Amino acid sequence: MAKYFKVIADNRKAHFDYNILETYKAGLALEGAEVKSIRQGKVNLKDSFGQVLKEEIWVFGMHISPYKAADQNKLDPVRPRKVLLTKRELVKLIGKVSEKGLTLVPLKIFLDGNWVKIDLGLAQAKKKYEKRETLRTREAKREIEKALKGKTYGRKDQ
């Protein structure tokens, strides 16, 4: 049986707010009802971040809506969730996060086979002028595409 790969949620704003230096694929410690809710796509990565606590990495601020058929009062939708990494990756990542100006940002949640995985990005925050430059280049690309669509390149259709 072939493995499948399906992106459930994507944090597109992270690429605008941060320069992503490295990405890590990791597992998440979840409850059964949370997994079912994620499979339905009821997860939001907006305003979520990774943090090191007691030699472990945790994701804070990730909202997973309660699964309808499960006990609704049991789990907090925005509770911290433990990130599952190998010991080598964990030590490497903790060392890099302790550097000045680097942070962990969840980039996307996806299904890898039957497992829920998360892509964590080791990121450095962009300055305001870098964000403005990103907007300028994006707008310039849009204008170029718009101009190219309008041209006929020598064809005269009447």
Image (cartoon, helix red, strand yellow):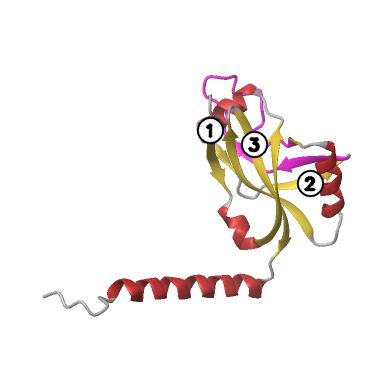
Q: Amino acid at mark 2?
A: Gln
Tell me where residue 156 appears, x and y as whole percent.
16, 78
Q: Amino acid at mark 1?
A: Tyr
Which image quarter is the C terminus in? bottom left
Q: Amino acid at mark 3?
A: Lys
Q: Residues within 10 Å of mark 3 (few under 14, many from 20)?
A: many
Tell me where residue 120 appears, x and y as whole percent.
69, 47
Residue that numbered label 2 is attached to: 51
* 129 up-or-down from 94: above or below: below
Give residue 4's mark: 1
* 153 up-or-down from 62: above or below: below
Residue ID at (73%, 37%): 80
Does 91 lie within the magenta span? Answer: no
Depth check: give the residue in front, 74 or 102.
Answer: 102
Badge 1 or badge 3: first in the primary sequence: 1
What is the magenta range? 55-82
Residue ID at (83%, 45%): 52
Does 73 lie within the magenta span? Answer: yes
Residue ID at (76%, 55%): 103
Residue that numbered label 3 is attached to: 117
Residue ID at (62%, 29%): 115
75 with respect to 100 (left or right):
left
* 149 up-or-down from 73: above or below: below
Depth check: give the residue in front, 139 or 79.
Answer: 139
